[in-house]
Every structure is written in structure tokens, then in C-alpha cells.
Image (tube, rainbow, N blue to C red):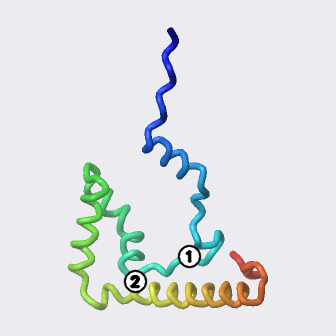
Amino acid sequence: MPKEAKPKRKAAEKSEAKSAKSTKSSKGKGGPKRALSAYMFFSQDWRERIKAENPDAGFGEVGKLLGAKWKELDEDEKKPYVEMAAKDKTRAEEEKASMTKAKESGEDAVDDDEE
């Protein structure tokens, strides 16, 4: 006597329904990148140095060391990173404004001066 097929579990049905749905986010592709903070510019600059000094340190440990180093810096040492962050903030705001303007006019947000 052949076994009857068991009904699927509800959890399996839910996961199938989720995979069938589109996972596209509401944010459009090709949008402007978010501005980086002064700390992020600092960490990009110092990450390799910290990793060279501490080759056995993991990802989390490198992050902790970067955070400690950032706290040690005085305002004069942070100034170049703060300036880079300010420039990046204006860049992001300009890109966002141009994208918003293009969406309002019904055009695609494509800039002629892309790098």
C-alpha cells in the first residue's frame, strides 16, 4: 500500500511564498551613495596600518583598535578627516538633489558628469 503524501508544513509554505515575492527594496538602483563620516575616512586610512601592527587580530579586534586610536587623536589630527567628511557630505547632498529633481521631472537619474 503506497504511502500518502504528507501535507506540507505551514512554515514551508511561508518560505516558498517569501521566495516567490520580489525582494527588491524601495530604494532605486544607482542612487547616490551616502556620505561617509570623519571616522570612516580615518578607518579607511588606518586599517592597513593597524592590521600590519596586529597581524593576528580579527575583524572585531581591528575595529576596537581603530576606535581606540580615533579617541586618542586630538582635534588637529582629526581635522583632515573632518574636512574630507564635509566635502563628501556636500557631494552626497548634491547627488541626492539632482536625483530628486530628475525623478520629479520624470527622467531617469543619470548624470552626464559621472566619474
Dot 2 amino acid type:
Tyr
- Residue 110 in the figure: left or right of residue 11: right
Question: Residue 35's spot in the image, x, y percent?
Answer: 49, 81
In the rendered view, would you say 98 is above or below 40?
below
Q: Residue 44 location in percent, x, y? A: 41, 69
Residue 81: assigned label: 2
Residue to which mark 1 is pinned: 33
Classed neighbour count for the residue bearing mark 2: other residues with Cα under 10 Å, few (<14), some (14–19), many (≥20)? some
Give the secondary structure at mark 2: helix
Give the x, y percent position of residue 73: 25, 82
Write the residue at 71% across / 84% down: 103
Judge by depth and name the residue closer to the eye, 33 or 58: 33
Q: Residue 24 at what x, y percent from top left?
A: 60, 62
Given this view, does label 1 or label 2 mark the residue nearer the observer? Answer: 1
N-terminal label among 1 and 2: 1
Tell me which residue sits at (60%, 50%) in the image. Answer: 20
Query: Does 49 sit left or right of 3 as displayed?
Result: left
Q: Nearer the viewer, residue 23 or 43?
A: 23
The residue nearer to you, when weighing 23 against 15, is 15
Give the left or right position of residue 67, taking residue 37 as reference.
left
Q: Are marks 1 and 2 in contact (CB under 8 Å)?
A: no
